[in-house]
Structure formats: C-alpha cells, structure tokens
C-alpha cells in the first residue's frame, strides 16, 4: 500500500497503465495471437494493484508473506506478464516471446512461472483458488491479502457463485476481488453488459461488501482498494466499469475484437502511436521500486513428525472410507500443513474425524464440489497439503478443476468414497464408475485404490509425502484387514497376496474386487486350479515390471476385475503396462448402467463377483 501523494502517484500509475497496454499489444502482435483488448480494459486496475496496493517482492515472488494476485480472466495473461516485467522480475524483451514454444510466458498463466500460483484460463476457477489462498493466510496466521481479477463474461460460470457463497460464509475479509466489466465477451456482448448494478446487487446478495467504480479512474480504483482493506467480516467485490480495448480508438467498445492481435506493420504502428500519445507528465526521477511495498519473509513452518504404525488387527472389519478419516486425523497431528475440505458429506467420508481434532484446519464448502476443489488448489499453491473429499461420483462435477490442477501440478490430495456398484441400494447416480479413468487420464496424477485399513493409512502417508496431485478411491463396504502393521506401501507398488509355482493365471483386483479374487482363489484351489492374486493398490504410477513378471509366470495370462466401467480403469492400466510383453489381459468390469440392490447382489448381477472370476479362469482352459 503506497502512501505517496496522489498528485504524484496518479500520473505515475497512468503512465504505467499506458506501458502495460503498449506491452500487451506488442507481445500479442509479436506472437500473432492473444487478447490485447482484454488486457487494455484492465490496465488501470492492474497498474494500481501492482504499484500502489500489493505487498510483494519482485525478486521473490513466492515469499509466503506476500500479498497474492490471481488472474481469473487468464486470457489477459500478457498484462500480467507486463506488470512483472515493469516491476523488474525479468527484462521487458522477454514479452516478445509470449506464446512461444520455448518461453514459459504461455497463452494463459501457469505455475511454470514463479509469480503464478495456479493455472487459469478455464474461466470461473481463479476466484475459487483465491478463496484457498485467503484461507491459507488464516492457517498460518499471516496478514497477507489475496486479490483476484475476474472478467464479466466469466461471471456466468456457476463456480463463480459457488465461490461467492463460500467466501461470504467464511467471512474472508482478507479477500478482495475485482470484476472487469468491459461489456463484451468472445462472440457477443456479455450477459449484463455495462449494467454495474446487476453485478453489485448479486454480490451484495451473496454477502460481499460491494463497491462500484469507473475502472479507468485511478482515484476511484485507489479509493476502492483502500476501502476494501477496512472491511471486516466479509470479502469485498469491486465492480469496475471498463471499456474493452480502452485507449485504442479502433477497438474501444467494439465487438469482434476478442482474441485478435494487431497485425505487424501499419496497423500496429498506428495503435502504438496512439498509445504513446497517452503518456502524461510525471515527477522526474521517480523510482518505480519506491511504489512497491515489500513484505517480510515469515519463519519456515515446523517440520512434520513421523506417523505411528497403523493400529488395526488382522481380520478386523473396517471400510476404507472410515480408515481414510482415521488416517487423515493422524496426518493432521503429524503435520500442521495438512488441511481437509468437505462438501457436506463429512460423516460419510469420515473426514469429520479430522474436523473434531483440528476444526481450524477444516473447511466446509457445503454442496459445492467445484469451489471445494478450486480452493484446495489455492491452499496447495500457498504451502498447505489439502485433502478434499466427497463421494467419488461427485468429483466428476469438478473434472475441469482437476484438469487445471494437473496443469498446475499442485499438491492436492483428493479422495473419493462410495465408489462402484458395491455401495448398494443408493443406485447408479451415487456410484462412481468412471473416476479412475478421469484421474488416470492426467499424466502427473498418482492414483491409489487401497483394499483394507492398513493399506489405506500407509497410502495416505505416502500421498501426503508425494509432491504433486494424487487421488485415493475408497469404498463403502467394510472389508477385513489383511495386512499387518509393519507392511509397507509405496506409490507405484503392488502386493502379490496369493501365489504358487503352479499358477495358471494372474488375477488383478483392487479395493472390493480384491476380496472377490481371494474368494475365487479359494474356490479354484479346492478344485485343483491355482491362480495368482495381485492387489493393484497403485494404478498410477503402476508396477509395470512386477505385472509383466506375474503374467509371464502364469502362461502369459492376466485377468483384471474392477468395480468400474471398462474404459480407463484397472483393465486399461494393466493392459498398457504389459502389452509390450505380449501378455493377454482379460477384463472383468461393470459393462452396463447399474441399478439399486444389495452390494453382493450387484457384484453378481453386474459381473464382477467371485463366481464370474472363477468362470473367467475356467474359460481360459
């Protein structure tokens, strides 16, 4: 927060805004693509934020005590890059490489850049991540503030209003968002165009302090930012009326310029000449660095302590979803960075065990899975290790957030319970049968599927230690503990739970289907047929060499059985792993839309029970 006299500050910011427009135009014209008009509407807003409001260190963008800025309207990336170049993080010449294959200044921001916390560009997500950033300030007892710039077009996204509700419910007075209401979308005018009252009424109704301003009037922008800092108990939304393509006569308020760069040559020269004419006299010798308030770097957090060994007895019946909750609470005691997020199912996922132990690190999002996952992204970007959990089926609502989480390579640990037909009577709307596919499709996700309480707890610890996004699938039915407390589990491993020298086929299961495979093993053994049984608790990374070795030892034959649709699950994971070895994989999976029923009935009806495994083994001869 700069305390410079306005008579000096406003001309300086005016010129910075002009340079940001020029840099955005030059960068996009150099690449031949981009969104210069979307940058131009936000120039005064970005100039005021970076050079009169944010506390940050241009040479230390990830300082834990620094204010955070999230560009939710990620297509305006060039003006973000221009602001950091203006602040001195890198040479302005780098802006000529925007969107180049060999530059990290991509078309939309990603955390490849030190000053970007989360990837944006899929609209409606940045404001959700900003909530996580604001929550993290509370977690570490910091006074850093989080700022988020949204576009008016993205305000049609439902996730924006999920965020509006949750941020108000949490009373995040350290969060200040700005909506750049330039009135024009990609293909037509936006929903409410320049009716600022439409935005203000909605944000006020959601419980936000709302300020309406002319987004090109720097005095109004500065006054609004100052007012936001005084608000207690609620977040602030600054509704800023702007003009798309501001400062460029040919584009000001004109439709059909979205995503179009100015052509090199006469068109660009004319635009730059016009923009250069907007500079105003300012105090000579003014040092831009003097406008930036640098934060103090806080002390590093305490190191985590080791978890004790699992305390379960062999044969004890406990659902992996309950073991998840128990392990989450143990993790929370061992590491203050662990936080949990819920979407009103904490008593089914058993994350309420964490809430009871650490209520200050438990964040309730109610039935709003997108903001739950999005705020987990913001928390992870600021150093927390978030564990958001819900029914696995409902995580599909947040599939786009999960995709962007992978792009950001954030340290989020998702958990989905109630997976597959084994949940029973609730029926197909509650049965996750595509979740493994969703997570395995992301190249950098760890995907885990424990079968008992011990493996769940051990894999929870492995997830927490893993650097990057991870997913754990848990089940509703109680299953017996089959592993002892000293058993170890690592990402990319598996367990061979039954084997002999005479095995004729390898059966690979995970979660509930492992126990169906064990039943089938006993039935076949009684008939003189030996099979190898593998617990594939890690689908990604996967134990490729161990699977190939098992397949080659069992006549080149593997059967996979999964409580999941055929596409993208265990069968596909194993087939991909062993294909180069010439091993045949026979897949047993749920192949039609299921229905309500008792778990054991559904396993039988939809072809994944022990009897179907037995039949598949015998069919191979």
Image (cartoon, helix red, strand yellow):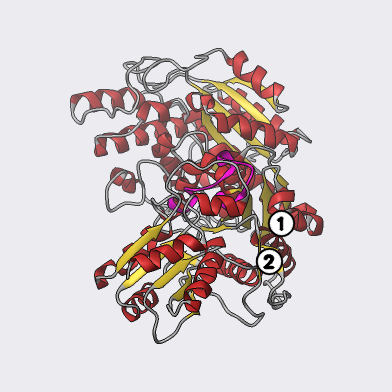
User: How much space separates mark 2 and mark 1, taking CA atoms?
Assistant: 9 Å
Estimate the x, y position of residue 87 in percent, counting from the top left.
47, 46
Residue that badge 2 annotates: 301
Q: In the current view of this chain or complex, which residue is farthest to the front?
A: 527
Find numbered disc 2 in the image and state the secondary structure of the residue it sits on. loop
Q: Is residue 282 above or below residue 55?
A: above
Q: Earlier in the sequence, mark 2 or mark 1?
A: 1
Mark 1, secondary structure of its residue: helix
Determine the image quadrant of residue 461.
bottom right
Q: Nearer the viewer, residue 473 or 67?
A: 473
**Picture residue at 58% right of the left edge, 79% below the top:** 488
Check disc 1: other Cα within 10 Å, few if <14, some if 14-19, many if 20+. some
Where are the magenta residues, as a range? Answer: 421-437
Residue 600: within the magenta?
no
Residue 305 appears in which quarter of the rendering? Answer: bottom right
Give how far across and how far down residue 258 sits, in percent: 35, 24
Left or right side of 73 for 130 = right
* Residue at horizontal 61 percent and vertical 23 percent from the top: 220
Image height check: is 225 above or below 86? above
**Which residue matches tag 1?**
140
- The reply to whether discs 2 and 1 touch (Cβ–Cβ < 8 Å) is yes
Q: Is residue 149 above or below residue 215?
A: below
Q: Quadrant of the N terminus?
A: top right
Question: Can I make out residue 418 in this image?
Answer: no
473, 46: nearer the viewer: 473
Q: Quadrant where the C terminus lies?
A: bottom left
């Amino acid at each position: 927060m700069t305390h410079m006299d306005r008579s000096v500050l406003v001309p300086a910011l005016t010129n910075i805004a002009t340079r940001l427009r020029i840099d955005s135009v030059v960068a996009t014209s150099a690449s031949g693509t981009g969104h210069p008009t979307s940058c131009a509407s936000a120039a005064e807003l970005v100039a005021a934020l970076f050079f009169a409001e944010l506390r940050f260190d241009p040479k230390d963008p990830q300082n834990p005590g620094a204010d955070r800025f999230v560009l939710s309207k990620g297509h305006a990336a060039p003006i973000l890059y221009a602001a950091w170049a203006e602040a001195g993080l890198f040479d302005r010449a780098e802006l000529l490489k925007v969107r180049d294959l060999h530059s990290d200044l991509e078309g939309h921001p990603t955390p490849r850049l030190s000053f970007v916390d989360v990837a944006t560009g899929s609209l409606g997500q940045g404001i959700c991540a900003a909530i996580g950033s604001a929550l993290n300030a509370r977690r570490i007892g910091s006074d850093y503030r989080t700022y988020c710039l949204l576009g008016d077009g993205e305000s049609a996204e439902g996730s924006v209003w999920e965020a509006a509700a949750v941020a108000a419910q949490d009373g995040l007075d350290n969060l200040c968002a700005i909506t750049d209401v330039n009135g024009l979308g990609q293909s037509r005018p936006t929903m409410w165009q320049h009716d600022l009252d439409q935005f203000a009424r909605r944000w006020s109704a959601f419980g936000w302090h709302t300020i309406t301003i002319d987004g090109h009037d720097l005095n109004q922008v500065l006054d609004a930012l100052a007012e936001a800092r005084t608000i207690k108990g609620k977040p602030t939304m600054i509704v800023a009326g702007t003009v798309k393509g501001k400062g460029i006569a040919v584009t000001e308020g004109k439709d059909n310029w979205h995503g179009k760069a100015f052509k090199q040559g006469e068109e660009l020269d004319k635009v730059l000449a016009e923009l250069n004419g907007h500079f105003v006299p300012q105090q000579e010798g003014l040092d831009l660095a003097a406008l930036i308030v640098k934060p103090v770097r806080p002390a590093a957090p305490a190191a985590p302590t080791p978890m004790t060994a699992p305390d379960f007895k062999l044969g004890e019946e406990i659902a992996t979803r309950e073991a998840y909750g128990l392990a989450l609470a143990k993790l929370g005691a061992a590491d203050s960075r662990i936080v949990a997020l819920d979407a009103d199912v904490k008593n089914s996922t058993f994350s309420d065990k964490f809430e009871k132990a650490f209520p200050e690190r438990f964040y309730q999002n109610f039935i709003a899975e997108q903001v739950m996952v999005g705020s987990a992204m913001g928390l992870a970007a600021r150093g927390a290790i978030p564990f958001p959990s819900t029914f696995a089926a409902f995580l599909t609502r947040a599939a786009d957030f999960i995709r962007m989480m992978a792009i950001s390579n954030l340290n989020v640990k998702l958990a989905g319970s109630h997976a597959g037909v084994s949940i029973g009577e609730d029926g197909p709307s509650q049965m996750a049968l595509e979740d493994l596919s969703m997570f395995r499709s992301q190249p950098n996700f760890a995907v885990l599927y424990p079968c008992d309480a011990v493996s769940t707890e051990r894999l929870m610890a492995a997830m927490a230690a893993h650097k990057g996004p991870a997913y754990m699938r848990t089940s509703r039915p109680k299953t017996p503990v089959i592993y002892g407390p000293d058993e170890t589990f690592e990402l990319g491993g598996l367990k061979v739970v039954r084997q002999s020298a005479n095995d004729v086929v390898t059966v690979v299961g995970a979660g509930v289907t492992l126990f169906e495979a064990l039943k089938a093993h006993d039935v076949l053994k009684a008939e003189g047929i030996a099979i190898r049984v593998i617990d594939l608790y890690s689908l990604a990374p996967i134990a490729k060499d161990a699977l190939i070795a098992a397949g080659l030892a069992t006549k080149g034959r593997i059967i996979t059985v999964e409580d999941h649709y055929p596409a993208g699950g265990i069968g596909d994971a194993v087939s991909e792993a062993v294909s180069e070895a010439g091993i045949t994989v026979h897949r047993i999976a749920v192949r039609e839309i299921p229905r309500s029923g008792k778990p054991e009935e559904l396993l039988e009806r939809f072809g994944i029970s022990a009897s179907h495994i037995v039949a598949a083994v015998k069919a191979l001869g």
